[in-house]
Amino acid sequence: MNTKATKQQIREIYLSRRNGLSPEYRTSASRTICDEILKTREYSLAGTVLLYSAVRSEVSLEPLFYAVIASGRTAAFPRCGKNHTMEFRKTDSLSELAPGMLSIPEPSDGCRVIEDGEYENALCVIPCVAADVYGFRIGYGGGYYDRFLSRRRGVSRICVCFDAQVSDKPLPYGAFDERYTRLITEKRKVFL
C-alpha cells in the first residue's frame, strides 16, 4: 500500500478517536495544552506566535491567543492561498477572522502580513490529525504546513493534539514532510 493510502486510513482512525472525545473533555484538555505551551522555552523566546483556528474537534488555541495578546507578543493566523501556500497575518482580535478558502477562519484583508524578519524568533503551533513521538505528524493532506515550514527553518515548532491522537509507533512520512521539535498533549510532552 502506498504512503498516501496509508495516511488516509490513519486519518480515519485518528479523526474517529478525536471526534469521540466529549466537548467538555476537549475544552478542558485544550486549556491544559495551552497552559503547557506557555511554560515552554520556545514560547518564552518567541516575539511572534503563529496560531491556527480550531475547526471541528481540534485543540482550541483561544486561551493561548489571549495570553499572547496580553503579553504584548504578536499573534498571527494563517491564510491559505493557491498551490497549497500559506501566509500568516497579525491578528489582534478573533473578530478579525472570517471563513476563508477552506471554510477555516482566516485573518481579513486588513490584517498585516507577517514579514520575513518576524519569523526569526517565532513559534509555530501546528495542528494535526495524528502525531507520533518521533517528530512526524499527519494533517489533512494539503501540505500547507510542510510547505510553509520548509521555507522557515528557524521557526520553533510545537505540534499539539489530544493524547488519543498520538501513536507510539512511527507514522508513515514522505520526503517533503516536515518534523516538529516538541509535541504537547493534555497528558504528555515530547521534546526531540
Image (cartoon, helix red, strand yellow):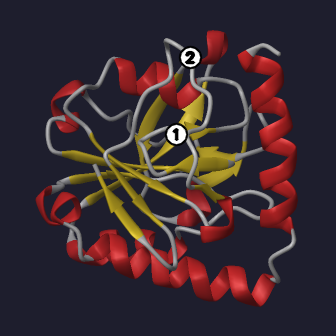
Report the side of 26 relative to 95 (left or right).
right
Residue at image location 75% in from the left, 90% down from the top: 24
Tell me the crowding category of disc 1: few under 14, some 14 to 19, or many 20 or more residues within 10 angstroms, Cα based.
many
Residue pointed to by mark 2: 174
Report the side of 159 relative to 21 (left or right).
left
Residue 8 spot, x, y in % from top left: 83, 31
Question: Does dot 2 land on a helix, a strand or a loop?
Answer: loop
Report the side of 25 relative to 79 (left or right).
right
Q: Distance from label 2 to label 1 (Cα)?
A: 23 Å
Residue at image location 20% in from the left, 37% down from the top: 118
Residue at image location 29% in from the left, 25% down from the top: 152
Q: Can residue 109 be seen by looking at this rendering? A: no
Mark 2 or mark 1: which is in front?
2
Amino acid identity at mark 1: Pro
Q: Earlier in the sequence, mark 2 or mark 1?
A: 1
Residue pointed to by mark 1: 78
Quarter of the image for residue 117 reads top left
Q: Nearer the viewer, residue 120 or 95?
A: 120
The vertical placement of 57 against 84, above or below, is below
Residue 86 spot, x, y in % from top left: 52, 26
Residue 93 spot, x, y in % from top left: 49, 65
Report the side of 111 relative to 42 (left or right).
right
Question: Does dot 1 land on a helix, a strand or a loop?
Answer: strand
Query: In the rendered view of the protein, which quadrant contains the N terminus?
Result: top right
Amino acid identity at mark 2: Gly
Q: Residue furthest front?
A: 169
Q: Nearer the viewer, residue 160 or 117?
A: 160
Quarter of the image for residue 94 reads bottom right
